[in-house]
Image (cartoon, grey):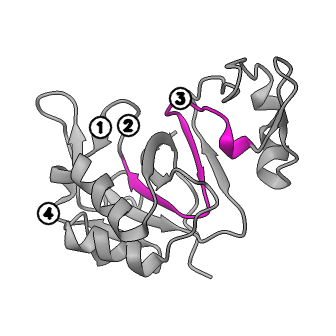
């Protein structure tokens, strides 16, 4: 399953405008030409602001002839009506942000959390949480808007401090990141 590096406001209910986000990505040259309404080719700044671990990552910036999405590019998702939770194949069990108890049954509850967000009841402390507020330890993320940096694998890369700083300055919101599976591209509403 292909994975991505996601960036989102720490407050999953925040919904900065797509124009603001695209402005930051364009200014830092993380994104370049539009591929469609929600996807953009990687710009010259992609490899400066996505910091790869290891000495020689193999980065593919041109779309493969087979039409797959296995190349570095940017997708903007949202704004959604409520936070969208994105997980991946290696997502660890989330923890309660209050008592740190693990949600061992999270996979069986995931589809209902994504469809109707009924809340996550912690058996450790008895508190109820929105699934977006659980501690996913960097392997899932939620937000009304998401920046997806595609073809970046878990633990392989992280955003530069400057990228996170500029997003925070432009949106007046602190940002964070996580690794998760590709999200179907959602055109703006």
Comes first in the chain, label 3 or label 4: 4
Give how far apart the Cα atoms at labels 4 and 1 are. Answer: 16 Å
Q: Where's the C terminus, which quadrant? A: bottom right
Check residue 59 for magenta coloring. Answer: no
Q: How many residues crowd around disc 2 within 10 Å: few (fewer than 14), some, or many (20 or more)?
A: some
Comes first in the chain, label 4 or label 1: 4
Percent of width and height locating residue 118: 88, 47
Residue picked out by circle 1: 157
Q: SS at mark 2? A: loop
Q: Nearer the viewer, residue 54 or 164?
A: 164
- Indicate left or right for 112 with 143 as reference: right
Give how far apart the Cα atoms at labels 4 and 2 are. Answer: 20 Å
Q: How many residues crowd around disc 4 within 10 Å: few (fewer than 14), some, or many (20 or more)?
A: few
Q: SS at mark 3? A: loop
Q: SS at mark 4? A: loop
Comes first in the chain, label 1 or label 3: 3
Q: Is residue 60 visible?
A: no
Q: Is residue 74 above or below residue 49?
A: below
Give how far apart the Cα atoms at labels 1 and 3 are. Answer: 15 Å
- Indicate left or right for 6 with 92 as reference: left
Q: Nearer the viewer, residue 35 or 154?
A: 154
Q: How many residues crowd around disc 1 within 10 Å: few (fewer than 14), some, or many (20 or more)?
A: some
Q: Quadrant of residue 51?
A: top left
- Indicate left or right for 61 with 95 as reference: left
Q: Nearer the viewer, residue 112 or 34?
A: 112
Q: SS at mark 1? A: strand
Region rendered in magenta: 131-151
What residue is at 76 percent from the left and 29 percent from the top? Answer: 106
Residue picked out by circle 3: 137
CB within 8 Å, label 1 to label 2: yes
CB within 8 Å, label 1 to label 3: no
């Amino acid at each position: 399953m292909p994975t991505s590096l996601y960036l989102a406001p720490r407050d999953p209910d925040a919904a900065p405008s797509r124009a603001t986000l695209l402005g930051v990505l364009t200014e830092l040259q993380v994104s370049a030409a539009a591929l469609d309404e929600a996807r953009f080719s990687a710009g010259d700044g992609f490899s400066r602001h996505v910091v790869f671990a290891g000495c020689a990552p193999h980065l593919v910036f041109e779309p493969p002839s087979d039409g797959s999405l296995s190349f570095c590019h940017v997708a903007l998702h949202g704004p959604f009506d409520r936070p969208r939770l994105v997980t991946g194949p290696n997502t660890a069990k989330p923890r309660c942000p209050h008592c740190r108890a693990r949600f061992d049954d999270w996979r069986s509850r995931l589809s209902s959390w994504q469809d109707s967000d009924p809340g996550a009841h912690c058996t450790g402390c008895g508190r109820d949480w929105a699934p977006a507020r659980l501690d996913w330890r960097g392997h899932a993320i939620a937000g009304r808007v998401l920046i997806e940096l595609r073809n970046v694998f878990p633990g392989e890369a992280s955003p530069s401090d400057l990228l996170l700083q500029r997003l925070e300055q432009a949106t007046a919101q602190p940002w964070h990141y996580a690794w998760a599976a590709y999200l179907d591209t959602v055109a703006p509403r």
